[in-house]
Image: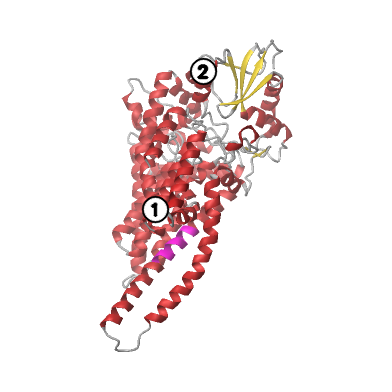
């Protein structure tokens, strides 16, 4: 676990700010410094405010108060000087490490312990802490690990409630649910787990009225925590600016693409705003996400094709690509072993019950044996119900993910990854050598691919022959995470002058991370020198040009962008090919000037 903390420290320092982090920092900064939550309704403010806490120590504010129409450009202020970017990146990610990552690891231990005992808890905690697929996403300034913490805490408390139903435990489940919802709108997906725990719990005084009371207590605690979070973010709420922000989202002038489908909600949302602005903001965000998902706005790249409509098999394939081969093998073997153990366990339980069947008047020793068997059976029934809740939670989450149009990366599976890896943890925990081998191999793999975890796939050891290394984009290859590594390699190898072809890297980010590099854009001449081409260029351009309007939202606009960049890319790739560097950049050298793109 100390090695896992060290790996997170390395990730904090070596991964540049990814595509969403500057906007999250800006939204959190505005809520903290100015007391108004008018940006980034698509995510609740809890994580953003915590991530932005280090910005309060800066002498100058990150940006003046603004609205969502210019938020993305204002967010580039985090790159206004390299010193500010470095301070904020390290300090803000360290805050998330302390507030969410370490508690999540502890909750995964408790989750595994509830499912199979302390060794299973240790195995599960080591798996989620050391896996190269999860490692790079844990401390980035997004909401995924926080919502995962809320999910795990809800399940841990659900196990305790099943064992001993109490009002305090029900309230704790509600607080965990509230944490999940205050972190991300998808936190609502853990609510059925809470409800199932209350329904499936058994006890001598657990009637319908008491169950309803437990559910009401949990719901009130969850709502109070979410309301408190929005209240802190809106402590200096200005109704004029607040209503304008809702209008921007409803009229497609925000950072959500909703067309004209949100206008029908505007009157109702403004009416709610008059009574409870915090609820109005939460509803605006969740409705906007619903509409954007229905429109299928974001194109995703997979196996040479790009499309906006979700593929039901996207997340299963991504799970196979990003999960360590060690975990896949352990999970497969666990399935075989657990099936065999289940069959033998049924026979053993039947034999114990037959042996415990006693004639009347058998004496105190026999009575004690019968009582012990009854207690063991009650504990086993509670454990089975808990495992049933976990299975239902994983099925629900995966069903929603697979039916969604948001095919945007491995990190979106984080809340249920501990459940998907639980069979491997159960298998590893049965033998000391298994646990040591799994943990050791996961650590060795994470060290081997460092610091390029985010863009790695489980066939990384094939090197240049790896057939899957660029199979998927979106949070994997084109999220700006490797700019620091690119700068270090360019300096070490003397790649000067270095020209950068990557349309998703802003000029401000390039100047902060690669101050001596030159950004190249369509229409400019190509001087001799070194060229680093983002993988997204060679992936997306041919894929967009092959796509049809039915496959992509706003395909004509994307096609226009691809056609402008294509001549530049075609000219650069005629130079000397020097392979890939920094994980996601293709390196070329041009020996003579070329015509403009």
Q: CA distance from mark 2 to mark 1?
A: 43 Å
Find residue 594 and report its image quarter.
top right
Where does the magenta region start and end? 382-391
Is 300 placed left or right of 353 in the picture? Answer: right
Residue 111 is at least partly visible in this image:
no
Is 112 placed left or right of 252 in the picture? Answer: left
Of residues 98 and 503, the one drawn nearer to the viewer in this rendering: 98
Badge 2, how many Cα within 10 Å: few under 14, some, many 20+? Answer: few
Q: In the image, what residue occupies the spot 34% across and 49% down?
A: 224
Residue furthest out toward the front = 433
Of residues 124 and 174, the one drawn nearer to the viewer in this rendering: 124
Name the quadrant of the N terminus.
top left
Task: Give the label on residue 121, or none.
Answer: 1
Badge 1, how many Cα within 10 Å: few under 14, some, many 20+? Answer: many
Pointer 2 with pointer 1, Cβ within 8 A: no
Of residues 286 and 200, the one drawn nearer to the viewer in this rendering: 200
Q: In the image, what residue occupies the spot 48% across and 72% down?
A: 346
457 over 81 or under it: above or below: below
417 over 40 or under it: above or below: below
Residue 387 is inside the magenta segment: yes
* x and y, in percent, of residue 102 in the image: 36, 42
* x and y, in percent, of residue 223 in the image: 37, 50
* x and y, in percent, of residue 508 in the image: 50, 20
Q: Secondary structure at mark 2?
A: helix
Residue 143 is at least partly visible in this image:
yes
By secondary structure, the bulk of the magenta-drawn segment is best described as helix
* x and y, in percent, of residue 163 in the image: 34, 64
Instruction: Give the residue pinned by disc 2.
Output: 492
Find residue 293 and report its image quarter.
top right
Name the quadrant of the C terminus.
top right
């Amino acid at each position: 676990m100390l090695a896992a903390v060290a790996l997170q420290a390395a990730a904090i320092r070596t991964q540049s700010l990814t595509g969403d982090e500057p906007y999250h920092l800006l939204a959190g900064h505005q809520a903290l410094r100015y007391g108004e939550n008018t940006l980034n309704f698509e995510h609740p403010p809890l994580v953003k405010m915590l991530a932005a806490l280090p910005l309060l120590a800066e002498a100058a504010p990150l940006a003046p108060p603004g609205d969502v129409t210019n938020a993305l450009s204002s967010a580039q202020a985090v790159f206004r000087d390299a010193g500010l970017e470095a301070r904020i990146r390290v300090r803000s990610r360290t805050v998330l490490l302390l507030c969410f990552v370490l508690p999540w690891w502890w909750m995964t231990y408790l989750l595994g312990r509830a499912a199979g005992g302390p060794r299973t808890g240790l195995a599960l905690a080591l798996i989620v802490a050391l896996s190269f697929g999860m490692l790079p996403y844990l401390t980035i300034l997004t909401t995924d690990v926080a919502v995962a913490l809320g999910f795990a805490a809800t399940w841990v408390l659900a196990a305790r409630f099943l064992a001993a139903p109490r009002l305090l435990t029900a309230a704790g489940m509600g607080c965990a649910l509230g944490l999940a919802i205050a972190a991300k709108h998808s936190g609502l997906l853990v609510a059925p787990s809470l409800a199932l725990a209350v329904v499936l719990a058994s006890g001598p005084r657990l009637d319908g009225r008491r169950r309803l009371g437990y559910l009401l207590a949990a719901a009130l605690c969850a709502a109070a925590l979410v309301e408190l979070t929005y209240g802190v973010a809106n402590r200096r709420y200005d109704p004029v600016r607040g209503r304008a922000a809702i209008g921007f989202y409803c009229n497609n002038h925000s950072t959500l693409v909703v067309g004209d489908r949100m206008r029908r909600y505007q009157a109702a949302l403004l009416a709610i705003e008059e009574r409870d602005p915090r609820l109005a903001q939460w509803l605006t965000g969740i409705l906007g996400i619903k509409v954007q998902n229905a429109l299928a706005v974001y194109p995703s790249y997979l196996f040479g094709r790009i499309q906006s409509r979700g593929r039901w098999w996207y997340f299963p394939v991504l799970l196979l690509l990003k999960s360590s081969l060690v975990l896949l093998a352990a999970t497969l073997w666990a399935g075989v072993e657990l099936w065999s153990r289940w069959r033998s366990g049924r026979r053993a339980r039947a034999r114990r019950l037959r042996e415990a069947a006693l004639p009347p008047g058998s004496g105190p020793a026999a009575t004690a044996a019968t009582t012990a068997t009854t207690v063991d059976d009650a504990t086993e029934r509670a454990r089975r119900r808990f495992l049933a809740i976990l299975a239902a939670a994983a099925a629900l989450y995966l069903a929603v993910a697979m039916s969604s149009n948001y095919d945007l990366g491995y990190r979106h599976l984080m809340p249920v990854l501990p459940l998907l890896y639980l069979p491997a943890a159960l298998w590893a925990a049965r033998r000391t050598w298994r646990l040591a081998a799994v943990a050791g191999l996961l650590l060795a793999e994470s060290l081997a691919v460092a610091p390029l975890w985010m863009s790695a796939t489980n066939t990384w050891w094939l090197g240049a022959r790896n057939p899957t290394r660029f199979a998927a984009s979106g949070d994997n290859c084109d999220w700006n995470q490797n700019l620091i590594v690119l700068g270090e390699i360019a300096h070490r190898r003397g790649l000067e002058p270095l020209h950068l072809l990557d349309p998703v890297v802003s000029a401000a980010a390039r100047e902060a991370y690669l101050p001596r590099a030159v950004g190249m854009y369509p229409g400019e001449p190509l001087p001799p020198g070194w060229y680093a081409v983002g993988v997204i260029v060679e992936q997306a351009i041919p894929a967009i040009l092959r796509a049809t309007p039915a496959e992509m939202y706003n395909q004509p606009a994307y096609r226009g962008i691809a056609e402008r960049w294509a001549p530049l890319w075609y000219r650069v790739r005629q130079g000397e090919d020097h392979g890939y560097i920094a994980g996601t950049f293709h390196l070329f050298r041009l020996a003579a000037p070329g015509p403009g793109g």
